[in-house]
Image (spheres, helix red, strand yellow):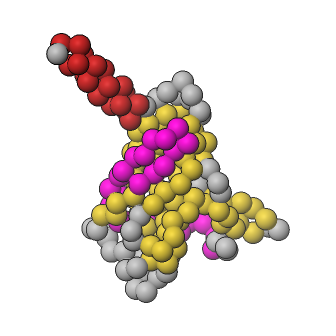
Amino acid sequence: MKSLFILLFSLIFSVNSMASELMVSGQYVRATPPHAKNSAAFLSISNHSNKVVKLIAASSDIADRVELHNHIKEDGLMKMRQVKEVVINANSKVTLQPGGYHVMFLGLKNDLKEGQNVNITLYFDNGNEVNIDAPVQKISMSHKTMHH
């Protein structure tokens, strides 16, 4: 009985320590004007492990599709493109922000209004999943219009 307790405690501790290696902070989703079809989420991911981890997907029930995107400069214009992954190096932090990497919501099912919260699941190449609640906030575009 004692060894079973020790085994269960060890398993719980190892699962909790794996989850705590990835920490998400500063998350928010861009509010939309009425009838907008797309929006984006921004956040920071800290990797407290000694291994490179890749964000490989995200999901949410607020849109038909959820993709990882980045902005690139092409033919003198800034454009958004889907990416397969976002690399978070060992013992470092990556910030998904306007003008850079972000989680893109395509085919929104409803308008996103300031004060709401959006549930997002982030999927990593090491098998970890992180569920977050992101508040909807109004933000302004301070850079040139983006093209898909």
- Residue 102: % across, % down: 54, 58
Q: Which residue in the rendered view is the most extreme toward the top? A: 2
Asked if the stretch drawn in magenta spans residue 64, the answer is no
Figure disc tally: 0
The residue shown at (41%, 64%) is 60
User: 99 or 3: which is nearer to us?
Assistant: 3
Q: Which residue in the rendered view is the most extreme toward the left? A: 1
- Residue 143: % across, % down: 60, 66
Q: Is residue 1 above or below residue 60?
A: above
Residue 102 visible here: no
The residue shown at (59%, 55%) is 101
Q: What stretch is highlighted in magenta?
A: 121-145
Which image quadrant for residue 148? Answer: bottom right
The residue shown at (31%, 70%) is 114
Asked if the stretch drawn in magenta spans residue 125, the answer is yes
Q: In this view, does 56 lie above or below 35?
A: above
Q: Which residue in the rendered view is the most extreme toward the bottom? A: 35
